Image (tube, grey):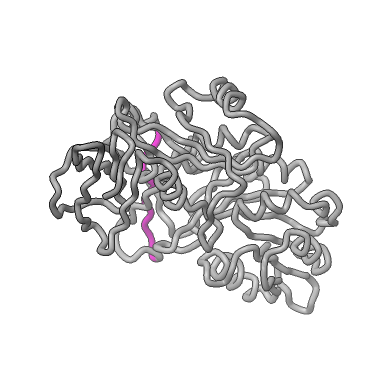
Amino acid sequence: MVESAAGAQHYLAAGSGTPLYHAGGLGVSLPAIFLLGGHIVLHDGFDASEVWHHLERERCTYFFAVPTIFEMLTRVPEWNTADVSHLRWCISGGAPLPAPLAALYRGRGLVMKQGYGLTEAGVNCFAMSVEEAALKAGSIGRPMLFTHARLAPVSQPGMADGVGELCLRGPHVAKGWLHTGDLARVDEDGFYSIAGRLKEMLISGGVNIYPAEIEAALLDHPAIAAAAVVAIPDPQWGEVPAAFVVTRAPITAEELTAFLAARLARYKLPKRIEFRADLPRTSSDKIAKAELLDKLSRSNGALLSLRCATPHVGRATRIKSGSRTEPIFFEPRAWRPTPPMTHRIRAPLLIVCRRPCGEE
């Protein structure tokens, strides 16, 4: 994409599938394209058909969006009819790109790259060429110029071999090594791949489980359009995975579990599968997992959710169960009985009662 626009000899245009208040929308495309003398095609709102029309009419050479947008673009008739022969590549960012979705775009004849960045270190931290994107599917590439990356050991039992916390250092980082909170791997050629989020990792019976791995397996099924996996408390194992899915074709929980059983270890199988018409999203189109937990809490008498007005500080809440009042608190990684008094927690706090809970 590094071409000169001098003398109008080259045409360079980018389609943006993210809002400008998002770091990706403002930082990934706009500065570089403007510096090269190109232009950005923006939209007042999202309409999948209109996006294809604009990509074709404006002859965009590059398109950036989050995985949710890329998936929604495949649902409209224009997915099969739009002329995008001028589109050199697409870049996905903001969330892990499901392998089946990337394969779908490659089957359409489009180059699909996966980017990586974060607010604290800038939106472009890794890069790869078009050829590398095809050879290293699923990778975010190698660190960009002046960016240093390493994997920090994670002191958790059962951590998969080769997985560590991704740390970044460079002139774009305020000071020292930035611990991103993302779990990653690096291959022998120096290409990094994201394995999941450290804070989303759950421990079931002392074994680490990565929701991203289960979500990727769910999205391998052609009937699944979207998926999210969260940790829910379990009296025997401490935590177990629960899955929320949006389908594009009829499928039962039993059929989906059987499909997963051929791809995942038994302890990784979701102990609960909920089918939803859609999944809640943040303003940047990431799945709002905290909201899923809240909805699960409200629909299940065994779970209540407490939002803290002050970060890290919470008030103990009594839960009436029959004739007894049992203050039982569940925190990420472990649960323990807690007396009804002010204590430090990691928000959000899930209050767990082993029996259907009554009114507070």
Q: Name the residue at 61% across, 37% down.
A: 219
Q: Residue furthest front?
A: 323
Magenta portion: prevailing SS class: strand
Looking at the image, residue 214 lies above or below residue 89:
above
Q: Give the side of residue 30 with respect to residue 8, left or right.
A: left
Q: Quadrant of the image for the N terminus?
A: bottom right
Residue 301 on image: x %, y %: 37, 41
Could you say which is closer to the camera, residue 45 or residue 53?
45
Left or right for 46, reference 66? right
166 is within the stretch colored magenta: yes
Residue 225 is a magenta residue? no
Answer above or below: position of 188 versus 343. Answer: above
Residue at position x 47%, y 30% in the image: 270
Q: Residue at x 29, y 40 (%)?
A: 352
> Residue 184, percent across and down?
43, 42
Q: Residue 198 at x, y = what percent?
A: 37, 44
Kindly tell me whether residue 134 is visible in this rendering: no
User: Going 73% across and 69% down the picture, which residue do you hit?
Assistant: 12
Q: Is residue 212 above or below residue 316?
A: above
Extent of the magenta region: 162-171
